[in-house]
Image (cartoon, rainbow, N blue to C red):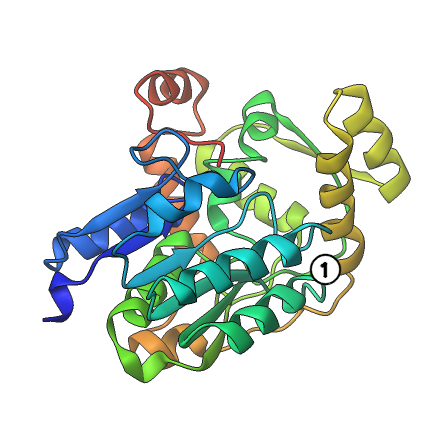
Amino acid sequence: MMKEQTILLIGGKGKTGRRVAERLLNIGYKNIRIGSRSETPPFDWENPDTWPAAIAGVDAVYVTFQPDLAIPTAAETIQKFATLGTNSGIQKIVLLSGRGETEAQVSEKIVMDTVKNWTIVRASWFNQNFSESIFLEPILSGQVALPRAEALEPFIDADDIADVVVEALTDDKHNGQIYELTGPSLLTFPQAIDQIAKATGNNIVFQSLTLEENVALLRQYQLPEDHIWLFNYLFSEVLDGRNASVTEDVQKVLGRKAKDFTAYVKEIAATGIWNSATHKQAVNQGQITKI
């Protein structure tokens, strides 16, 4: 029985991983294993000694790689994991990748060439970056400063990604497929912030930076250099116009359209997460993740 298989979700506490876990449990998959340093057995990308116990007896894996498949060490790590997993009996890997990330495609190719069955899910920038991750604190402060103010991005909802991943994990008709997931409309970052400001009634100022100014600002905040490199890579390479188009892959897989950014904003505004007091309470209750 398919629902008796053991599925490992690497990054199972992150934005998409926890949503995939919830959905699998809701449709009757009980043997769900969360791949995280805090779990038992633990899983740590930086410690390959943790991998054998985490994948023992696993049939399928959802792979999210931290911090991003574009980093220089990702390909070597993915090669080691894919080889070990295949030799250990893993039948399928669903890999979350970034849309338009040329460097990430090296790891995609490794998975395609190594594992028995695979599905590649390339995602645009997440809606949830504005409510669960990197842009939340600036929104709460009332000032968002970013480069590439002119770049158009088809923001995709994490719920849609999770629904596609569940389909890929549980239905073999998705084996050997590459899906590019986007929302149904193109927005610039200033337009996205403006929608949030209007929905919340908050005054949120968008400041356009050059790439150089952004790097200097991140260093001022004392971010690690590898995080600064990744942030600069995403804004300088991925947001150069190559992703300024929408796909229908969400509808192709799910039979429905992807959630529009406007609908996402309306839903999140109703929760009060973009209200400072409500946000503080959510953090204390563990409802907000930085992953």
Q: Can see residue 259?
A: no
The residue lying furthest to the right in this view is 212
Residue for badge 1:
238
Q: Can see residue 122?
A: yes
- The front one of 280 and 268 is 280
- Could you say which quadrant of the image residue 280 lies in? top left
User: Where's residue 50, x and y in %?
Assistant: 43, 39
User: Where's residue 207, x and y in %?
Assistant: 76, 35
- The front one of 42 and 136 is 42
Q: Which amino acid type is shown beneath numbered disc 1?
A: Val
On the picture, is 253 further left or further right than 134?
left
- Could you say which quadrant of the image residue 249 lies in? bottom left
> In the image, what residue occupies the spot 45% across and 33% down?
200
Question: Against 178, is 97 above or below?
Answer: above
User: Where's residue 201, x and y in %?
Assistant: 48, 31
Crowding around mark 1 (Cα neighbors within 10 Å: few <14, some 14 to 19, many 20+) is many
